[in-house]
Image: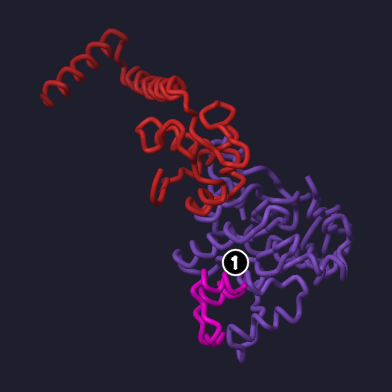
Chain colours: A red, B purple
Amino acid sequence: MRGSVTIEFDNNLPIYLQIMNFMKKEIIVGNLKAGDKIPSVRELASELQINPNTVQRTFQELEREMIVETKRGLGRYVTSEESKIMEIKKEMAGELLDRFIQGMQELGFASDDIVSIVSEAVRDTVGNKE
Amino acid sequence: MSQILKFHNVGKSYGVKKALDDVSFEITAGKIVGLLGSNGSGKSTLMKIAAGVAQPTAGHVEVTGMLVGSKTKGLTSFMPDSPLTEDWMRVADALSFYNDFYADFDAGKARDMLDFMKLSGRDRVSALSKGMKERLQLTLVLSRNAKLYMLDEPIGGVDPVARGKILDAIVEYYNEDSSILVSTHLLNDIERIFDEVVLIREGKLLLHEDVESIRLNRGKSIDELFKEVYAEC
């Protein structure tokens, strides 16, 4: 997470959840690596133009999920456990899949159809790249 | 958590018209609270009473546990909707005026904020644009080390860029031991700096809630909630 950060907020959803998701994504894609220091509450609040208490809450939740850890007097750091990062990745993939499957079901596809459509699509995308 | 502002069944009548009717709520330290309501709903009256410049006709108000009076005025920094400056002043005059007037005025903080706001001490107040005037007002009010800050419509009639700058300043320069009450009816940009909102309509308190729980429980933005609540007005 270097340079300036911008998040397009959706005011219909809790802001702290949106920042949590943003931080998780930064970790998954490797912009924030295991053991990296994360910005202070003040820094992130003024960067995102939001209330410092909201950022505080985000960090507390991330700590509760053991994604971020506080080192006394030093600040907050991304967990150094790679397995935790893998876990976040799976969790976010799971959410993506749930939404996808729900969407397909709403379109009227049965489970078997969804599977075959997905495997076809994956084959096509991979095939195109090669 | 320490309590900053408390309204006890406050009412205010102007003749037969009730500007405030049985309003009770409290704000704890470290909060940025939006005071929302359509025009004429009683926002300014509420702030004036908390600032001690208007007297309630019923109930009473406490600031940090003390009844509003000369002592609490020293702890309350109020930006009314009319200017705090005189047209003959330059920006530097306005600052020294405030410095003389308030014991808790922090001249260093004021200079920092002036820089941040891109204002110069030599600028004539009468020559400032509306947006720049708002920035100056905010500089004066936030440069005091008060417990309670009250900003009456700080972003009304200001373009989006200046609005962003004013919101930045609020987030940047407030401190956790104090609270800020901000009245507005423009919500789109400002709602994400609030911890809580207080909604009043026709002088009555409708709702006082944490903004994140409004979003979580109702799945809507404060802006939408506002439009819903005031739709019938």
Residue type, numbered disc 1: Pro
Residue A4 as seen in the image, left or right of residue A79: left
Residue A57 point in image, percent of width and height: 60, 39
Q: Residue beneath label 1, please?
A: B154
Point 44% across, 37% down: residue: A22
Residue B146 as seen in the image, left or right of residue A27: right
* Vertical order, A123 against B204 (above or below): above
Res. B29 visible in picture: yes
Question: Which contiguous range is marked in magenta?
Answer: B110-138
* Vertical order, A1 against B103 (above or below): above
Quadrant of the drawing holding the N terminus of chain A: top left
Quarter holding residue A97: top left
Main structural element of the magenta stretch: helix, strand or loop? Answer: helix
Residue B62 point in image, percent of width and height: 85, 57
* Vertical order, B96 against B54 (above or below): below
Queried whether the magenta region covers residue B31, the answer comes back as no
Residue A55 point in image, percent of width and height: 56, 43
Who is closer to the viewer here, B122 or A116?
A: B122
* Vertical order, B223 against B63 (above or below): above
Quadrant of the drawing holding the C terminus of chain A: top left
Who is closer to the viewer here, A130 or B183?
A: A130
Residue B170 as seen in the image, left or right of residue B67: left
Point 71% across, 46% down: residue: B208
Res. B17 visible in picture: no
Residue A6 as seen in the image, left or right of residue B35: left
Point 28% across, 14% down: residue: A114
Secondary structure at numbered mark 1: loop
